[in-house]
Amino acid sequence: MRYFIVDDDPGVRSMLMDIIEDEGLGEIAGEAEDGAHIHAELLELQKVDVLLIDLLMPHRDGIQTIRALEGRFEGKIVMISQIESKSMIGEAYSLGIEYYITKPINRLEILSVLRLVDERLRMQQSIQDIQRTLQGLTGLPSAGRHAASVPSKTIATAGHFLLSEMGMIGEAGSKDLLDMLKYLEQIETEDQTLSPYMFPSLKDIFQNIAVRKLGTDASATEITKEVKASEQRVRRAIFQTLSHVVSLGLTDYTHPKFENYASKFFDFTEIRKKMLELQNNVEPSLSQTRINTKKFVQVLYMEAKRLLH
């Protein structure tokens, strides 16, 4: 991340720069002693992600500066001040600041806030990547009079992105999961009753995608064999995904993929168990891991649908 610091106290600017650089939080794009020196074009030119700004400054204060930037600066704003007036703090938040930190500066508080801001920026970037990826996979232009003639985004492209995000797309079971999404979308389109409470049984889902894959002429024995093989592929894929997502969390609890996917797709007890296994270098075992396949498929389908809207 790139930071720009605005504060009339050079000591505060120096302290903030030291914290950012010492902790490897990013780069200092620039600094200024007053809001009068700040404008949107400068921040854009310097590719600023986070603006750290004091509230009280001699010529143009933080509130006035933020008003001048409104709608023209896409980064995050963190305000730092000795002022603890609830009305002024409320006004700052109403203008779109991310956090308000009171002086004197506390190193731990600064670190905590800037890491949270970094997390939000990464999540925002992830959402933008999703949109670009879906457009790229379908060839869908962002605008233009010919857009209507181009195929729309599909449940499969959304699912493909999610599986890629979780490090799963290379697993054999990922193809089965994408087939499941297409089947679920079809039955929802047909009867409009699909919900977490009326979700098809896993047996029905596996049975139907097996018939689709082998054709209606396939024997009962062939279909049963394919259902079992598909179940095993999906379980192995989910197991590997659990290990991958948990490993991200062990490295960094605030990793956006861990925070966004772990609790949604997996049971907390299994996340905790997997963390302990990885911490203690225990050889992972699929047979000893409770894989909630139905929950995973349900969440995958709902999340893929959400990306399409």
Image (cartoon, grey):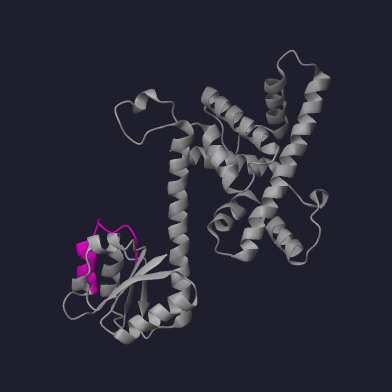
**Going by the image, does 45 lie left or right of 201?**
left
Residue 257 occupies quadrant: bottom right
Whether residue 210 is situated above or below residue 257 in the rendered picture: above
Vertically, is 107 above or below 245?
Answer: below
Answer yes or no: is residue 153 visible: no
255 on left or right of 105: right
Front position in the image: 60 or 28: 28
Q: Quadrant of the N terminus?
A: bottom left
Placement of 61 over or under 164, stated as above or below = below
The image shows residue 178 at horizontal and vertical percentages of 61, 33
Of 218 and 73, nearer the camera is 73
Instruction: Find residue 261 and report its horizontal and vertical position in percent.
Output: 58, 52
What residue is rendered at 59% in x and 33% in y? 181
Relative side of 226 to 72, left or right: right
Residue displayed at 50% across by 31% down: 154
| Residue name at image x 37 percent, y 63 percent | 49
Magenta stretch containing residue 64, yes or no? yes
Which percent across, then down, holds residue 60? 18, 74
Q: Which residues are magenta?
A: 62-78
